[in-house]
Image: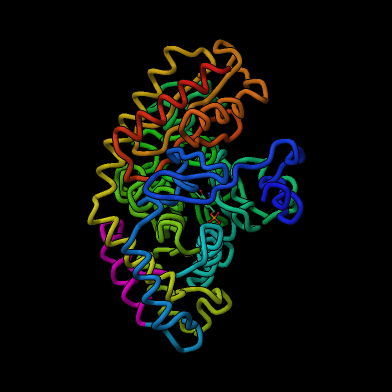
């Protein structure tokens, strides 16, 4: 397996250049929040798959729902004047789930990048239908991550995800993220920093011209960019600025929807009602590639009242509303609510965050610990706390490798160790992750 992984499976991230020497960890089993590798080593999965296996690896109701739907109707398109019963039922469930976010309609996709692309494309179309075809630009946050399609890559805030693919979509501009540990304003007070970032947004809108901007896209808590929770005033401030300027607000909740932050959605955490909400990942707990873009009623109505009759033509996927994915999502949503995973995410997240902060007292290699909103936590490593210089390159990888040997899978993203376990983990599992991290940090 290890030899064939490097020989036949291509991607630099999946098998780095030295993969013959350092083969990837090959996972062969998963149960609850634990995974097992090809050598039989079992660990707590501190990554939760990839922020998506919220309910653990052996969720029987989802498995049963998938199996039943495979027998009943494995596929039918929802784009040829046809629909399927399963996706209609899911749409009702999602409408109920996201009603407090003001979102009533669902457009289905095959994953997070598709959901982002959908929201960007439909934003432009929305303005066109309303006679504002000049609104084509997109604003987003530096350090934001929005997937790998050309539109998503264009609004990604990290240049590393953009430069290899340029030229990207014209008219995408990035404003500073409310990242207290490093920001262009040298401001470490979260409330003051939020105001400075909001001012930067207002300035950018004035510079570009409000009538040229289609939408602003942001993650309510930035994830892949290194877990950056904004001050509570930030997202409401963004929503207000967008509303004032006729700019649509897209909440990219591919990570944050369905309880990860301790609230049922990241928008709800901050009391904001976006125009679009991108979801994917945990919507099927990793059992099926699936996503939904939730849409506010006023946006849906604009499309439905379009007199040209061309609305939304030209956008959709073969697998939009896939009945097996929809069956998985219905069961997943029911389990998510029944187990009240948002509450557990908040409680276990607080334990993990407090434990990570305690590690900072013991290890100088930790420069910053971010979290405080459910099970999204980052430990940023440095080589020097005073200068905040980046750690030597092998350091994060060594923390990860040692932690893995000591019982927990954690993720490295740049200088950060990111923790995003399944939302059903127990206090004992939290302790396993913390003691594995302790071993990893001791090793460096
Ligand atoms: N948006 C956000 C906020 C994400 O975290 C991700 C994936 N990490 C994506 C979009 C893209 O999702 P996918 O990988 O399913 O295409």
Furthest residue toward front: 40
Q: Is residue 106 magenta?
A: yes
What's the residue at 39%, 21% (across, down)?
357
Splitting the image into 4 quarters, where does residue 365 fall?
Answer: top right
Question: Most prominent secondary structure in the magenta stretch?
Answer: helix
Placement of the C terminus among the 4 image quadrants: top right
39 or 93: nearer the viewer: 39
In percent of width and height, residue 370 lies at: 43, 29
Q: Is residue 224 left or right of residue 296?
A: right
Residue bounds of the magenta highlight: 85-107
In percent of width and height, residue 109 lies at: 50, 67
Can residue 120 be seen? yes
Task: Tell me if residue 267 comes above or below residue 195 in the rendering.
Answer: below
Q: Is residue 253 left or right of residue 142?
A: left
In percent of width and height, residue 208 lies at: 59, 48
Can residue 199 be seen? no
What's the residue at 58%, 30% (across, down)?
401
In percent of width and height, residue 5 lies at: 69, 51
What's the residue at 53%, 51% (across, down)?
28
Task: Tell me if residue 239 comes above or below residue 375 in the rendering.
Answer: below
Give the number of marks.
Answer: 0
Task: Tell me if residue 5 comes above or below residue 191 in the rendering.
Answer: below
What's the residue at 38%, 55% (across, down)?
58
Q: Is residue 314 magenta?
A: no
């Amino acid at each position: 397996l290890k030899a064939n992984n490097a020989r036949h499976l291509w991607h630099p991230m999946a098998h780095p250049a030295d993969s013959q020497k350092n083969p990837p960890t090959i996972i062969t089993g998963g149960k609850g929040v634990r995974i097992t590798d090809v050598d039989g080593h079992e660990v707590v999965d501190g990554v939760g798959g990839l922020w998506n296996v919220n309910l653990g690896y052996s969720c029987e109701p989802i498995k049963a729902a998938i199996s039943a739907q495979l027998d009943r109707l494995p596929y039918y398109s929802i784009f040829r004047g046809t629909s399927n019963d399963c996706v209609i039922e899911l749409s009702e469930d999602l409408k109920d789930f996201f009603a407090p976010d003001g979102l009533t309609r669902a457009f289905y996709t095959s994953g997070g990048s598709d959901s982002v692309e959908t929201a960007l494309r439909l934003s432009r179309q929305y303005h066109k239908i309303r006679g504002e075809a000049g609104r084509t630009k997109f604003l987003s946050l530096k350090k934001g991550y929005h997937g790998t399609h050309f539109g998503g890559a264009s609004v990604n805030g990290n240049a590393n995800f953009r430069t290899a693919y340029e030229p990207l979509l014209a008219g995408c501009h990035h404003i500073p993220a409310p990242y207290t540990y490093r920001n262009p304003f040298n401001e470490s007070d979260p409330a003051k920093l939020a105001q400075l970032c909001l001012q930067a947004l207002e300035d950018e809108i004035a510079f570009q011209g409000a009538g040229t901007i289609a939408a602003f896209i942001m993650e309510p808590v930035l994830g892949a960019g290194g877990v950056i929770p904004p001050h509570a005033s930030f997202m409401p401030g963004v929503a207000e600025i967008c509303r004032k300027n006729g700019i649509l607000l897209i909440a990219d909740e591919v990570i944050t929807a369905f309880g990860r932050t301790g609230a049922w959605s990241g928008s709800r955490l901050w009391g904001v009602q976006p125009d679009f909400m991108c979801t994917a990942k945990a919507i099927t707990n990793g059992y099926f590639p699936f996503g939904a873009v939730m849409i506010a009623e006023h946006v849906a109505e604009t499309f439905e009242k379009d007199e040209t009759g061309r609305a939304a033509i030209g956008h959709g996927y073969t697998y939009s509303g896939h009945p097996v994915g929809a069956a998985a999502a219905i069961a997943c949503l029911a389990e998510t609510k029944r187990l009240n995973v948002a509450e557990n995410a908040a409680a276990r997240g607080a334990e993990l965050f407090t434990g990570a902060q305690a590690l900072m007292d013991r290890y100088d290699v930790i420069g910053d610990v971010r979290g405080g909103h459910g099970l999204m936590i980052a430990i940023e490593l440095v080589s020097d706390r005073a200068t905040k210089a980046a750690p030597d390159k092998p350091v994060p990888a060594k923390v990860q490798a040692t932690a893995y040997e000591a019982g927990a899978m954690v993720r490295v993203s740049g200088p950060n160790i990111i923790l995003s376990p399944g939302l059903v983990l127990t206090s004992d599992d939290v302790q396993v992750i913390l003691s594995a991290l302790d071993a990893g940090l001791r090793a460096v």
